[in-house]
Every structure is written in C-alpha cells, then in structure tokens.
Image (cartoon, grey):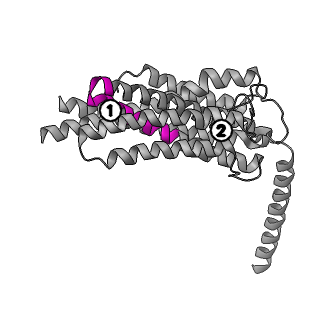
Amino acid sequence: MRQSWWKILSVLLLSYTLIAGFLGTVPVKPILNETIRNLYFHVAMWFAMMIFFIVSLVYSIKFLRSNNLKHDWYAVEFANSGILFGILGIVTGAVWANYTWGKPWSNDIKQIGAAISILIYLAYLVLRNSLPDLDKRARIGAVYNIFAFFLLIPAIWVIPRLVESLHPGGMGNPAFNTKDIDSRMRMIFWPAAVPGWTLLGLWITTLRIRTRILEEKQLTND
Amino acid sequence: MTKYLKYFLMVLMAGLNSLCVLAQTNNEVPQMADAMRANGKIYVVVAVVAIILLGIFLYVIRLDKKISQLEKKGK
C-alpha cells in the first residue's frame, strides 16, 4: 500500500464517526428525533462531493494550461467520485425526507438543484466518451468541466438561498441550520465525519487514477 | 413391567415440568450482559454498520495492495 498514514486516519475517523455518531447524545428535536444523527452521514456526503468537484475543476484548469493528459485523468476520476458522493447524498436525503417531510421527493429546490448538478456532471462523462480522439476528448472535457462547476454554484449555492424550502437552513445558509446542532454534534461532524468520508473518497479516487495509469501503460506497451 | 415404566414416565414428566416452570421463573428475573439489548437495541445497529464499514475498508485495502503489486510488475 502506498502512503498509508491518511488512509489509516480515514479508518480511524470513520470508526469514531460511527461509534460516537450512534451512541453520543444529540439535541432533542420534534420531527427529527434520532434522525438528526444523519448529519454525520448525509451532510458529509455533500461536503465530500463539493471538495471533489473543486479538485476536479483545478485539474481541468491545470490540463488546459499544461496539456498533460495525466491532469485530465485526475479531473475525470475526481468528478467520478464527486458524482458517486452526490448520488449517495441525494438517495440518503430521499430516505431521510420520507420520514421527516412525508415523502421521498417533494420537488424541493435543494433536491432539484442537487439533481440538476448531478445530471450536468453525468453529461460530462457522456460527452467525454462520445469523443474518440484523445486530445479532443481531454480538451473539450476540461472546458465542459469548468462550465459544469459554474452551473453547480447557482444550482446548489445561490438559488436555494433565494427560494423557500423544506430543507433546514432555509434562507441564508442553504445546507443546514447551525442552530439545530450543538457543540457535541459539531465535535463529531467537523473533525471526524467530513474529513473521514472525504479521505475515504480520496482513497477510492487515487485507486481509480492508478488503475487508469496502469491501463494506459498497458496500451502503450502492446 | 409396563406399570413401572408408566410410573417412571410420570415422575420424569413431572420433573421436566417443574424444570420448565423453574426455567420460566428464572427467565423473568435475572437478565445479565444485556448491553446489546439496551436503548432500543441501538448497539445492534452500531454493530451492523461497523461490520459494513470494516468490510468496505478491507475491500479497499486489498484493492490498494493489488494495484500496488501491478505497479511494481510494470516497472
């Protein structure tokens, strides 16, 4: 295994998130009840997704500046992980909403915004695979990826702040109401849940990048 | 002979019966080492999720090792 300290850290942080996340005390709220613990899992997915899309954007810009295909692979694989965490976020959100808002999908602005941004990123993968020429694929893919990121900003950061929503946070912060959680929950969420899930996603991403590099090597050897 | 057998069976049944009653009364009162059943059995959920996470970690670690081996071979 390569560079394993942060991989061990990910295991430790996630183990702590699980144990403390289930057994720690949480604020007592109507409707939410024990589901407030989903903060450590559902909300962490979105943080991880956002981080991966930002890293993907950075590598796309890097590719356009350097024309180094490796940067393009990094961009794709980080986008892949972002999509994975985004889908997990939307699905877990639907499960949570089913028991708190009454139905899994209520066409809430945050659900729509998240769904649109995931579709935009899925289109990135489709667009890449529809271009057979390697250089063209990387270049057009990188340009589209930058475009996709700047659609993500209004879809999940701006519009949800302007519209009424069932989702906690409401006007102001679209993602979550900081008054709902207390310091006990913050001590699990910020130092353990967010970095833990992000590191696990990063681990999977690096594995995919290394597989891709191996594949390319095999192609050039044959 | 059959008479003795009958008596023997009756005594045995009575003994078993009283044992059963004893076991039932025993079951009602002392319950020990029941951490897994406390708090609405939340610890069972913790155990399940911990096993899933452990499985995913082991899987990713093995995948990582496999890819590392392939990388060594390629060099």
**Who is closer to the viewer here, B51 or A221?**
A221
Q: Is residue B11 above or below residue A167?
A: below
Q: Nearer the viewer, mark 1 or mark 2?
A: 1
Q: Amino acid at mark 2?
A: Val
Q: Quadrant of residue B21?
A: bottom right
Q: Mark 2, chain letter? A: B
Lateral position of residue A131 relative to residue B5, left or right = left
- Residue A158, by quadrant, is top right
- The location of residue A68, given as percent across then percent down, is 26, 27
Query: Which secondary structure, mark 2?
Result: helix
The chain letter for the residue carrying disc 1 is: A
Say whether residue A68 is magenta.
yes
**Residue highlighted by disc 1:** A72
Q: Is residue B64 left or right of residue A111?
A: left
Residue extending furthest toward the left: A222
Which amino acid, by three-letter code, is at mark 1?
A: Asp
Q: Position of residue A95 (x, y in %)?
A: 67, 48
Magenta stretch encompasses residue A110 = no
Q: Label 1's element?
A: helix
Which residue shows up at 49% across the image and 33% down it? A149
Q: Is residue A36 visible?
A: yes
Mark 1 near mark 2, Cβ–Cβ under 8 Å?
A: no
- Identify the main secondary structure in magenta: helix
Q: Which range of residues does the magenta coloring cover?
A: A64-85
- Rendered view: A107 above or below A7: below
Residue A6 appears at what percent x and percent y? 46, 21
